[in-house]
Amino acid sequence: MDDNYKIRKFREEDLEKVVLINRLCLPENYSSSFFLDLHKNYPEIFIVAEHNNEVVGYVMGRVEVGFSDFHKFKIARKGHIVSIAVLPEHRMKGIGTALMLQALKNMVLHYNCQETYLEVRVSNEKAINLYKKLGYKEVRRIPLYYLDGEDASVMSQELKLEEIQKQTLNHQ
Ligand code: COA
């Protein structure tokens, strides 16, 4: 990721650009209030990437409490990645990785999460590669999860701050 890119927290004035990036990049689109609600409740894991002061990518998530994917019958705080996208002309430059690493770090530091998970279309190889690189593994599939009938792969990992910091250093 070159010096013209910057990773920072979402601000309300970014809303229009983030909504646009979401519409351009993904079939799963949301109302403005959905974005704002996530920001209100989990501001530390709503992150954007800027290129020359223009927002070019975002990641957002929420925190949930539920059964651990790794320890039987244990309850865990889980950081759920709800959506991530980078504009096509800015892809393959490490932006997606940088957005994810910042969100994962903040899940631990600000929300005390022990695990993180997400859903991804089984055909979305690029995103699956990104998540695998970060340590996520498929834990189950959800048939017909998406409106067009595609299955979701649920990918999950335990959060380890030291590991995230190591990956962040290697990514700089
Ligand atoms: N083909 C194969 N793997 C790819 C890829 C491609 N075209 N683009 C990214 N990846 C994988 C690689 O493993 C890559 O690591 P590497 O560079 O060491 O090989 C890794 O992702 C990280 O790439 P990075 O440059 O950090 O990601 P990005 O900025 O290109 O963003 C997405 C990745 C998925 C966010 C981006 O492709 C995107 O916005 N896609 C459309 C929206 C989407 O599918 N979101 C996910 C929904 S679950």
Image (cartoon, grey):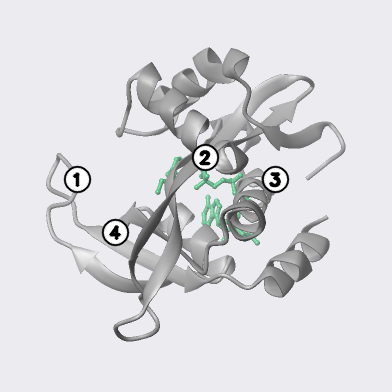
The foreground one among 90 and 85 is 85
The foreground one among 95 and 35 is 35
Residue 17 coordinates in the image, percent (x, y): 54, 17
User: Quick check: 162 above or below 146?
Assistant: below
Measured in 3D between alpha carbons, the distance from the residue under mark 4 to the one under mark 1, in whole angstroms, is 10 Å
- Amino acid type, callout 4: Val
Q: Is residue 3 left or right of residue 29?
A: right
Mark 4, residue position:
122
Secondary structure state at the residue bearing disc 4: loop
Mark 2 or mark 4: name the one nearer the start of the chain: 2
Percent across and percent down for residue 61 are 47, 44
Q: Measured from the top left, where is residue 96 in percent x and y?
A: 60, 47
Mark 3 and mark 1: Cα distance apart in space: 28 Å
Q: Residue furthest right?
A: 3
What residue is pinned by disc 1? Answer: 146
Dot 2 crowding, Cα within 10 Å, few <14, some 14–19, many 20+: some
Residue that mark 3 sits on: 93
Q: Tell me the mark number nearer the camera, choosing from 1 and 2.
A: 2
Task: Residue at 79%, 22% (x, y): give it.
Answer: 52
Residue type at mark 2: give it: Tyr
Residue type at numbered disc 1:
Tyr
Label 2 or label 3, whichever comes before in sequence order: 2
Mark found first going from the N terminus, 1 or 2: 2
Quarter of the view holding residue 163: bottom right
Secondary element at image label 1: loop
Distance CA(mark 2)–CA(mark 4):
27 Å
Does any atom of ligand 1 lie closer than 8 Å to the CB of label 3?
yes
Q: Earlier in the sequence, mark 4 or mark 3?
A: 3
Circle 3 SS class: loop
User: Which is in the foreground here, disc 3 or disc 1?
Assistant: 1
The circle drawn on residue 42 is 2
